[in-house]
Amino acid sequence: MLMSARPAKSLKPAFQRVLLKLSGEALMGSQKYGIDTLVAEAVAKELKVVYELGVEIAIVVGGGNIFRGVSKSAGNMDRSSADYIGMLATVMNAVVLQDALERIRVPTRVLSAIHIPQLAEPFIRRRAIRHLEKKRIVIFAGGTGNPYFTTDSAAALRALEIHAEVLLKATKVDGIYSEDPNINPNAKKFDKISFQELIEKQLKIMDSSAVSLCRDNNLPIMVFNMKQSGNILKAVSGDLSIGTLVENSK
């Protein structure tokens, strides 16, 4: 489980506005499904450290810890119906994370692509940017609002819409490897890799539509392990030792 981190005086933010893609599974902790509120609290404390440095933070949260449209739990459901249920799961996770942040006095707004006014504001791009300018953390829920699109695609889309400088992809591994390091211990870890090389090597870090969207719009992706305490701060500081930076060749 993540533990809270104290700000490191030697670390300074390399980005002023970021979008963090947080999987629903990251909120499960050691459970098989559902939400571990202690993990949500730990994530919130990590985010507060970055927030207090003046960084504008937006978050896209997944829903795989509750329901995933392409999972076995969806059974023979119509894909569109299953995906909409997955969007509702992201709203649940977003509200849990909002509660954890606001209990430690970090102003937070949830903006949803599906209309649930009792729980979240509707997603309006200008409103989201205004919240960020007013130093509020913004959590985007409901994916893109459309079936057949993953929350990875939603993260890329929202990052571009709010003019984020980087998309931070929080995962269970410390970056991108040439092969699965669990299978081949000699697999090479990349500190930096181009979008073109990522595609040629068929390295699956996000779905192809999300990668293409980032590549075509020159939005770098930082892949890092968020289970290690302090890594969100290090990622925002541009520390490549904790992950891999994907960007267009220069």
Image (cartoon, rainbow, N blue to C red):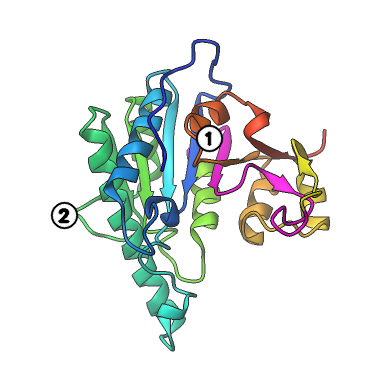
Q: Quadrant of residue 223?
A: top right
Closer-to-camera residue (216/238): 238
Which residue shows up at 38% across the image and 48% down it?
A: 140
Image: magenta residue range: 162-184
Q: Amino acid at mark 1?
A: Ala
Q: Position of residue 212 (x, y in %)?
A: 68, 54
Residue 158, given in percent of the width and then of the height, sits at 48, 46
Residue 96 shows in this picture: yes
The quarter of the image holding the N terminus is top left
Q: Amino acid at mark 2?
A: Gln
Which residue is the site of mark 2? 118
Q: Residues within 10 Å of mark 1 (few under 14, many from 20)?
A: many
- With respect to residue 105, does 90 lie above or below? below
Is residue 173 found inside the magenta-colored segment of the image?
A: yes
Identity of the residue drawn at 41% across and 56% down: 24
Q: In the picture, which quadrant includes the C terminus? A: top right
Residue 59 located left or right of residue 149:
left
Query: To which residue does mark 1 refer?
Result: 164
Contact between marks 2 and 1 (CB within 8 A): the answer is: no
Above or below, 155 relative to 13: below
Query: Relative to the observer, which residue lies in front, 9 or 196?
Result: 9
